[in-house]
Image (spheres, coloured by chain):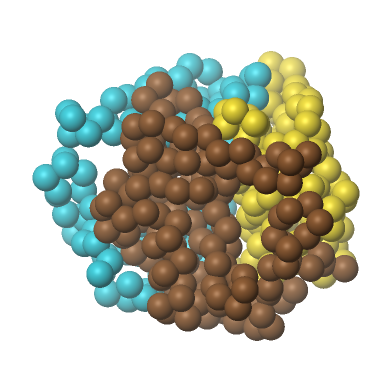
Chain colours: A brown, B yellow, C cyan
């Protein structure tokens, strides 16, 4: 689907905030209904998800300590009528090894976030048979 | 090189499609000649490449099973006169460990893709002595 | 903070250049004061940092050989009155394993870089008690 450009936000999330809920609240407060998100920084005790197809749900992996937030990529669209951020992260440990998956939760040590709003027809997530909540497929 | 802004596309690739060829076809069908690409999702049995300088070619690493598509970054430019997507991916396994490299192939389980078109002078890939196919260097 | 859109740059960094200093010089030469950065390619002997909170400084991890530059994410803002690039990278070895963190240094084998300029109030980095140099927090 095609969209036109909206606002641009570049900001630092306050230390101690839970990152995923902060992004969702930011989108709701600023009425960002569609957009893309990227960020770098570092997170404390992040929890990441790996979707287990057979079970139709995420297995949650709990990491302990501080991890470099090496990449954060994702998007904002509507779920149950509200702006919702779907976010994946890559996280670096003290040996430089990377871990990552679907962001479930993470306390911000540092997060420098860029949000690019897109404008157009609403993109809505709908529950699929797989257990995932997705947009309609592009034809 | 400087470019002006073109169209914005945000969409879900249909399940079962091969991601790299879908991106190339999308660019050709929509006449996106220059652009950037990012995505998240998950892929089945992805193949990634590591360029071996001494051999002037990619070593292909075949991963088995479903991997979270933690990041996908890349660009679209011209190769042999056609739009061509150059894409790198980070992939998460069920333990949260990350794998990645140059995307060679991957079947889509889920892929939420953002393509930002850029407009301007064509950027063309040319075969180099190294075996890589690259743009001219920025001066 | 909200910004409006500036210029778009998509280019290949010359082989052999040190990537981080090239990005800083590019921003200064082109007067990009605020922006975001992404890239793919491959780097020789990259050095990455992991911030050790107790010590208030980065531990530097030196990787040897050529690594696929699987993702590069970051931003440009002002530090000591000059444009400054804060960059995180994910790097793939010949087995497809990923390594990464804060980019300290890396010689370019290939780097295809996208810089998106943003325009607005200056975003300035200031030394924090933690030892990190950060923007003010978003309220």
- Left or right? Give the position of A129 relative to C26: right
Residue shown at 34% from the left, 40% from the top: A44
Left or right for B117, reference B84: left
Residue B27 placement (x, y as % from top left):
80, 62
**Image point 64% across, 58% down: which residue?**
B36
* In this picture, residue C138 sits left or right of residue A125: left
Number of callouts = 0
Vertical placement of residue B17 versus A127, above or below = above
Give the quadrant of the N terminus of chain B.
Answer: bottom right
Residue drawn at x 41%, y 70% as measured from the top left? A26
- Residue A130 image point, x, y percent: 78, 52
Image quadrant assignment for residue A68: top left
Residue B43 located left or right of residue A30:
right
Asked whether residue A66 is in view, the answer is yes
Is residue B136 among what the camera can see?
A: no
Q: Quadrant of residue C66?
A: top right
- Above or below, B10 against A101 in this view is below
Q: Residue at x 14, y 48 (%)?
A: C128
Question: What is the x, y in percent for residue C79?
Answer: 22, 54
Instruction: In the displayed orientation, state which residue is furthest to the left.
Output: C129
Residue B2 position, x and y percent, is 55, 65
Q: Relative to A120, does residue B134 appear above or below in the rendering? A: above
Q: Nearer the viewer, residue B8 or B99?
A: B99
Residue sticking out furthest to the bottom: A120
* Towards the viewer: B83 or B104: B104
């Amino acid at each position: 689907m095609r969209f036109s450009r909206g606002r641009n936000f570049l900001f630092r999330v306050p230390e101690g905030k839970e990152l995923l809920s902060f992004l969702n609240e930011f989108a709701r407060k600023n009425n960002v209904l569609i957009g893309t998100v990227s960020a770098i920084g570092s997170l404390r005790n992040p929890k990441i998800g790996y979707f287990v197809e057979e079970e139709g749900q995420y297995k949650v992996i709990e990491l302990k300590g501080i991890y470099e937030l090496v990449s954060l990529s994702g998007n904002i669209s509507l779920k149950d009528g509200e702006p919702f951020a779907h976010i994946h992260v890559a996280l670096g440990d003290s040996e430089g090894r990377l871990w990552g998956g679907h962001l479930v939760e993470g306390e911000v040590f540092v997060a420098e976030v860029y949000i690019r709003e897109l404008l157009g027809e609403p993109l809505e997530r709908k529950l699929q048979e797989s257990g995932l909540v997705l947009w309609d497929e592009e034809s």
